[in-house]
Image (cartoon, rainbow, N blue to C red):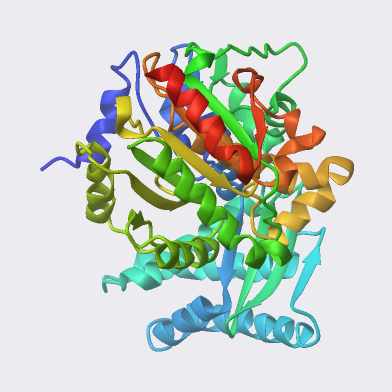
Amino acid sequence: QVCPFEFSLDLYLFCDFSILDYNYAFDPKVYLQRAYLSSHHLTLLVDEAHNLIDRARSMYSASLNYSDIQYLKNYMAKKHQGVYKSLIAIEDLCIKIHYDLENSPYIVSHEPPVALATLIERFIFMMQKYLNDSEEAIEESALQIYFDCVSFMRIYEFYRESYRTYIVNQEQDLMIKMFCIDPSSLLEEFYKQSQAVIFFSATLLPIQYFYRILGGSQGDLKLYYDSPFPNENRLVLIGDDVHTRYQQRVYSYELICKYIQIIQESKVGNYLIFFSSYEYLEQVYQKFVALYPEVVTFKQNSQMTNEDKQIFLERFKQSLTHSQVFFSVLGGMFSEGIDFKGEQLIGTIIVGVGLPQLNLERDLIKDYFEKVGYDYAYKYPGMNKVLQAAGRVIRSVDDYGVIVLLDDRYNSVSYQKMYPNEWKNMKITRISSFKSDLHEFWRKKQ
């Protein structure tokens, strides 16, 4: 008869060490208040800290959809006139905004949505009155919209210079969002309530970027540890004859296929090929199976269930008489957080530099940070995905394998500055020398 979740919260007070999701430590809507209010000195160990930037932006942002307001208005029409009228007022404002968007795909403002917030505040007041007075059960989807409005107002209270409000048409719908560009000052409020906060990850590069966005203060320690794995067990190659910029991709398919064919032929084993998008993956995959139908291939798709994921991963554990090539997506479920032990994975090819797709939010980040804006919005997040994917190959001191980076940009000074120390012996390759480079590496491993 006891709620397991509430029971786990009570048990927290008796624990020396607890493992939690980020939101229990940093989300202003659901953080574990008793952790910060207890008399114990709190230390936060933040694992995979490279993920906290986007998670924090999400936790400190909030949005509302016009379609949800319409749905709730219709649902409440015969239930409570006060709630109904408050939703009509919100709907009227949304209609006015919709007219303003007729000649523009979006509107961006440095100011909080004051008029909307005033109306939502009225709605919340009326809705709370209805929920307190009514014994009638309310539909879960309708209740969720009410909670979304409460969350919207909670985030509204945090609005500051590092926020932007944007309104955009989304498939005949209207979305209004308060977007947190720089979460550092909000994260700092939680740090101040802790005796220590330690961030760690294998890919906190470049460290200045993470230090800035995650709210580092003067005097904080920044420590870099070299990889404990032998450098000679890792071959890092840059194929700078491949050009993967969007306009040039169509000309890269056949060359990428040749690289894949050569690597899988160089030594029997499993190889992961990463692409920046499902579209790019699909185009190269179709080309590859047409050119080399005899090669065993598998590909990730965008609708994979947990069962599909397990089946995909089980194939890495099979004993092999021939190579297997797995086509996957950077930043997806197979590019981080998975240990391929021993010879389960002996090589990867990463196609492109992993830049996030161009969108409004990324451009808002770019504009906000000005001189370093492009790096903060696109280059560094992209390179972090590359480093994570490359890290799947070597997982222990006994592992060995090949990491191939296909894009001419990898050979530029700006990218070389972001490489970990263990990549200092990387080589430039071309399709003409690729086979011999692989042969030389595998010959030393026999």
Q: Is residue 299 visible?
A: yes
Position of the C terminus by quadrant: top left
Answer with the quarter of the image where residue 144 lies: bottom left
Determine whether 63 is above or below 54 in the image: below
Residue at horizontal 79%, vertical 50%? 366
Q: Determine the image quadrant of residue 418.
A: top right
Question: Which residue is found at the position 76% from the left and 28% from the top?
Answer: 417
Q: Residue at (51%, 32%) from the top-left corner?
A: 438
Residue 96, x across and y down, in percent: 73, 85
Residue 52 can be seen, yes or no: no
Residue placed furthest toward the left: 1
- How many numbered callouts? 0
- Residue 337: quadrant of the picture: top left
Q: Position of residue 17 (x, y in %)?
A: 35, 16
Q: Is residue 101 above or below residue 165?
A: below
Q: Is residue 260 left or right of residue 416?
A: left
From the viewer's perspective, is 404 left or right of 158?
left
369 left or right of 16 in image: right
**21 relative to 294, above or below:** above
241 versus 82 height, above or below = above
- Quadrant where the N terminus sits is top left
Q: Nearer the viewer, residue 95 or 233?
A: 233
User: x, y (%) of residue 8?
Assistant: 26, 32
Say which of 295 and 126 sits in front.
295
Which of the pair 375/297 is nearer the observer?
A: 297
| Residue drawn at (64%, 29%) of the image | 189
* x, y percent for residue 94: 66, 81
Q: Residue furthest right?
A: 371
